[in-house]
Image (tube, rainbow, N blue to C red):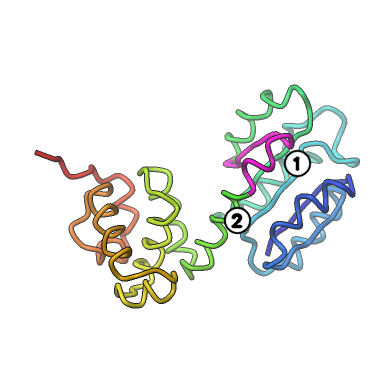
Amino acid sequence: MVLVVDDDETDQKIFANPFTRWRVEVVGTLRDALQAIEKIDDLWLAMLDVRLPDTRGDDLFGPNQSVFGLVETLRSRWPHAIVVIMSGSAAWTTFVNPAQAVQAEFFSKFDFDLNVRKLVDRLDRRELAGSDSNWNALERLRASHKLTASELRVAACALRGMDRAEMAENLGVSENTVKSQVRSILTKTGATHLRELARPPARTLATAKPRSRR
């Protein structure tokens, strides 16, 4: 499920359209958002306008009646969801640190086209990863290592225990391509075998040191 919270009808369409392959819920107020999340079983992505008609004055960062308070509610229910706060304000940089403080990402609406492809890619990998634990491990790998989008898709398959033939079939590439990407993943993460990506403390790989090259 993708949740879009924005009171501008044009922006609603712009932000919802790239994600139509997943179920999208679009609302225009904080109140409607709080009601909507009561009916959502599994949230993968929330995109929230920083200013809504029923937020409380200029208290954008307060715990109540603010988008940042909504983020904390979303985080308490879906800790693995991608939560993005957006602003069309020229002073959008003032929102970056508060967004990070509540474990949300932030970008200007003016840069949406630059960021939407990355969000779609991440949802593709979320679907491929299967479980919340696999997705969480994959996000740590994304944050901690310079894996390409293709390598992250291979890592998602590895987290599900697929062999190389299954990976190639699922990803629509050759086994030789998978083999090359696996080699790169092992080098970058410091792992010795793909099984290490699939083990439940896969999170340890997020802090593993890359193997040294001589």
The residue that mark 2 highlights is 120
Q: As drawn, is 109 to the left or to the right of 139?
A: right
Where residue 137 is drawn, which disc sits there?
Answer: none
Residue, x 81% and y 41% (percent of image)?
A: 65
Residue, x 68% and y 65% (percent of image)?
A: 1
Q: How far is the residue under mark 2 from the one under mark 1?
A: 23 Å
Residue, x 76% and y 57% (percent of image)?
A: 17
Tell me, yes or no, whether the two marked residues, 2 and 1, touch with CB atoms within 8 Å.
no
The residue mark sitting in front, 2 or 1, is 2
Residue 189 magenta: no
Above or below, comparing residue 32 to residue 208 in the picture = below
Instruction: Tell me which segment is drawn in magenta.
Output: 103-116
The residue that mark 1 highlights is 67
x and y, in percent, of residue 185 in the image: 29, 54
Q: As drawn, is 6 to the left or to the right of 68?
A: right
x and y, in percent, of residue 123 in the image: 57, 59
- Secondary structure category for the residue under label 2: helix
